[in-house]
Image: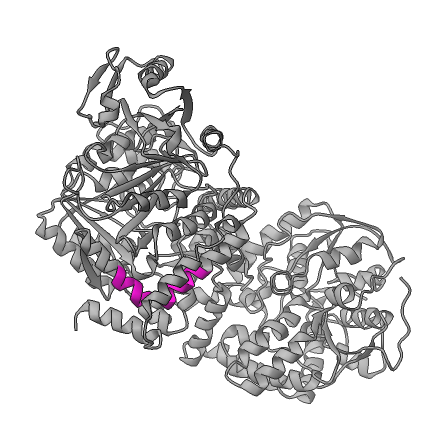
Amino acid sequence: MEPRPVTSASPRVGLFVTCLVDAMRPSIGFATLQLLEEAGCQVEVPTAQTCCGQPAFNSGDTKAAARLARRMIEAFEPFDYVVAPSGSCAGMIKAHFPEALASDEPWRKRAEALGAKTHEVLSFLVDVIGYIPKGRSFAATGTYHDSCSGLRELGIHAQPRALLREVVGLEMRKLEGNDVCCGFGGTFCVKYPAISNAVVEEKAASIEKTGAEILLGGDLGCLMNMAGKLSRRGSRVRAFHAIEVLAGLGQGPAIGEEG
Amino acid sequence: MSAREAILSAVHAALGGREVDPCRVTEEARELLGDPAAIRPQLMAHDLVEAFVARATSAKLIGTSVDRIAQVSEFPGAVGRYLTAQGLPAELVLQPSPELQALDWSNFEVRSEMAPDERVGVGVARWAVAETGSLVFHSGEDTPILFNFLPLHHIVLVRASTVLAYLEDYSNAFATTGERQPRNVNIITGASGTTDIEGILVRGAHGPRNLHIVIAK
Amino acid sequence: MHRTLEPFKTRTATALVDATLKIAIERTTATAERKRAAALSDFPEFDAARDRGRRIKDHVIANLDHYLIEFERNAKAAGTHVHWAATADDAARIVIELCRAAQAKRVTRVKSMLGEEIGLPHALAEAGIERVETDLAEHIVQLGGDTPSHIIWPSMHRTREQVSEMFRKAHKTPHEEETIEAMVESARRELRDKFLSADVAISGANFLVADTGATCTVTNEGNAELTTTPPRVHIVTAGIEKLVPSTAHAFAMLRLLVRSATGGDITQYTTFHCGPKSPGDRDGPEEFHIVLVDNGRSRMLKEGLKDMLRCIRCGACMNHCVVYRQLGGHAYGGVYPGPLGAVLTPVFEGLEKARDLPHACTLNGRCQEVCPVDIPLPTLLRGWRDRSWREGLEPVSMRAGLGLWAFVAGHPQLYRLASAVAVRVMRLFARGGWIRSMPLASAWTAHRDLPTPSRKTFMELYKEGQRSQGR
């Protein structure tokens, strides 16, 4: 599939990079930008974006989450689509903004409208814009972890696999328990570190058991959690966000490697 | 205010204090039983008896064996076959059902009182359900409840005409009898078992260890 | 509960280092998961059945007062004594009064989580009435002097060696061989006499059938029927949410319950009890009592926990919960463990005491996915978090930290500055690509490395005109 030209008729996509990508691994944001433009989208990055508010929402501070949701809605509603390289952040917008704004009818409606055009990037490429890049290569054995929000809130499962299947040289091995939570859970991993650690230890062991060289996934939080544990265990497994491999960044530094 | 009043008024208030229309409620409940085929598994065969036997002899039921006879009069013979195969003496306790008592038990020592550690109990099921391989007993004059649970070996006669397809077919069949609900309805599916110790299955936890079903055409 | 508990963090720390417990949890939950999956693959109609089950329960809940009255009327018409208990203590008191009226010295019990919820073991002990648990797992729990750790396999935390030792100490004619079969036979012998000589039997109910006034109990051992038939008095305690309109509706729910709990299509014994012994019956109790227990259920109806009343207590949620699978049941500290316990315990014990439970969850949603009646457990748990925040129960440091972060996130320019500063500060602690320790991050770095952020944030780089190759 050839990259498509971007014209004034191309869909206008607001890229929501997410707070974790912004601070911890910008290359995911740039890979997303690249793939969206290849797919023929006009991409803008509204500077009013900060965070989707999930940490507040999941901590029970619904008011703060609602405030942040309103800002996000204002920043992104002018676009045809909103795309984020994270199932959990896209899920927050789609599934939970209306919840956070349940008692504020006009805003709840705007949240639902925004949610309807918000997508996680891998599923956006496959399901919405119909762009599956061909001819990328990345010679490695890989395994895929399905992050919970993306999987259960957004139904993301087949799409990353459809995209990665086209990567030349990439041999994917099934991760036993690919749909089992890695123990990140946002603030959970710092509020209940001992439990989180027990969960991610098992996940790391499953990843190592595949014998794969590369861990791939769609959510940086989960990837950082698993990669951080693998590193602490002295494992040689290297982790990337799937979008980075699709953008040809697999040759670059993995998570936790210097650039 | 009594606890009853307190609870009912709390529930009523929580539900918005609305006026209940009992006919509408009954109608909704009935509708929720509609299109049963959509929510039930397929039977293992078209013929109900075959489906029942397939289920009863499958791995889904533990400790269960099935024998088939042409007529009810052959039941004592089937019981004798089972006892011989199990290396058990020809002794049993018979469920006080006139239908069973009328059969020829002359080859057996038959008792009517069941001991707590009774070895063999012989009974007759009121219905059978092909979906699950279950036997249905209703407590009554000819059906002491404990007869189904005390013996180690429980041998049960089932008439082919009493085999129903699904569990709901039993509740419908019972509704048409016009009888009042008995003290106990026991729907028995296989022999007793437990996996409470390290997940290991052991049969005969408290109830029978063996269930032998004899189906008469 | 009548015991004083250690803090949640202590309980979890104890559970997490218990290697024997971990083996037991893994065995129990992995088997249950496998069996459930096998049962569902044999039942393509499961999704439709699940949707129907959800609607049946929603219908009952929406008409709960109507069904309670109908149930009571039909139960009484069958000769049942119907009692109502607003609280757990009331329920226990009613049961004890009935036992005293029956001059009961010995009471046999069939496993019932509601019985645990109302504190029956404690109440019977206080009243000086001998309690004989007849369910093998509850018998083991009783001998071990602790509490159930799973709602379907209450003694899953016990090893065969522990059980063997308990049986040798307590049984009249204990097992000779060290086999599980021999142990089960020992229990069978031990409990048989007790079934037949008890004065009162107390059991629970999986369903209350409104149009017949009958209770429905599902078991695998046969103890339920052996226990509830010989005594003169049989008492059932049941939560008011257990209602279903008719026997046929009970069957529809049963198809979901057993597959979700143990992977079977039906339990060995599905029993409906209606009224005491009928005239002409050969056996059965002279008196049959049902105690309908509210204990917070009407409050759940009012306070946004209505969906939780659909629960049919199958245990699938805990079998698939990553947190339960690390902790087991006791660390939850309540009657019910796992996701269902995390939703219910704050109802019974108050949010202040139980606030850790809804928080110690990753909100991954697997529980809801396997729930046979589609209870939105993550939503309900987040609801408790919302309430905890509003009631000021969250730790001050948490409120302060989140408050600061939310303030900054609400001001994009400030946020840009703060994130740019943060990544530069973090990089000071980097050892190559990883940060192994850093102030304020010990909860993370105690167990894992933290990837070093890049020199600049995405938004900085983007503003500088960068369009690709993030580093």
- C135 left or right, relative to A8: left
Predominant secondary structure, magenta span: helix
Colouring mode (rainbow / by chain / secondary structure / one colour) = one colour
Task: From the top left corner, tell me how far across and down residue A150 is, in percent.
Answer: 65, 64
Q: Is residue C167 shown above or below C232?
A: above
Name the residue at 56% across, 83% down: A66
Name the residue at 70% across, 47% down: A174
Looking at this rendering, what residue extends furthest in the top direction? B107
- Work out whether residue A135 or residue C351 is closer to the camera in this orientation and state it: A135
Q: Magenta segment, which residues?
A: C55-70
Name the residue at 45% across, 61% down: C55
Classify residue A76 by image quadrant.
bottom right
Q: Is residue B147 shown above or below A170?
A: above
- C168 left or right, relative to C220: left
- C280 left or right, relative to B82: left
Name the residue at 46% across, 55% down: B34
**On-image quarter of the C terminus of chain C:** bottom right
